[in-house]
Amino acid sequence: FRGREIPDFMMSSHTVPPASIAGSPGLTVAAGLTPSGLPAALGFDGPLGGDRELLAIGMAYEEIRPSIPPPVLVP
């Protein structure tokens, strides 16, 4: 990382939410596009055993989220 060696656990914790490491449910849903056209996402974490509620929140969010245009593919 930037020319330095980083232990595996430290590197994984940089990209993995702490709740996932602890075994709590997590959900990531598409949130739209940045002004430069890159995809953006929104992450939700829930308590242990809260999988159904977390999925319900994600589904409710997707119902109100504006539509996201498909990516432009360049050959």
Image (spheres, grey):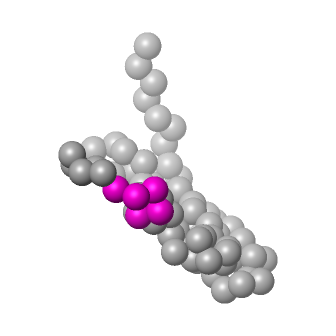
Instruction: Tell me the magenta residue range.
Output: 6-10
Q: Position of residue 6 (x, y in %)?
A: 34, 56
Above-or-below relation of 68 to 11: above
Closest to the observer, 31 or 23: 23
Above-or-below relation of 40 to 20: above
In this rendering, position of residue 64 left or right of residue 12: right
Q: Main secondary structure of the magenta part?
A: helix
Q: Position of residue 44 (x, y in %)?
A: 56, 74
Q: Position of residue 49 (x, y in %)?
A: 77, 83
The quadrant of the rendering that contains the C terminus is: top left
Q: Position of residue 36 (x, y in %)?
A: 27, 44
The residue that appears at 52% across and 74% down in the rendered structure is 18
Question: Can the viewer see residue 57 in this picture?
Answer: no
The residue that appears at 50% across and 70% down in the rendered structure is 17
Question: Can the viewer see residue 70 in this picture?
Answer: yes
In this rendering, position of residue 42 left or right of residue 47: left
In this rendering, position of residue 2 left or right of residue 44: left
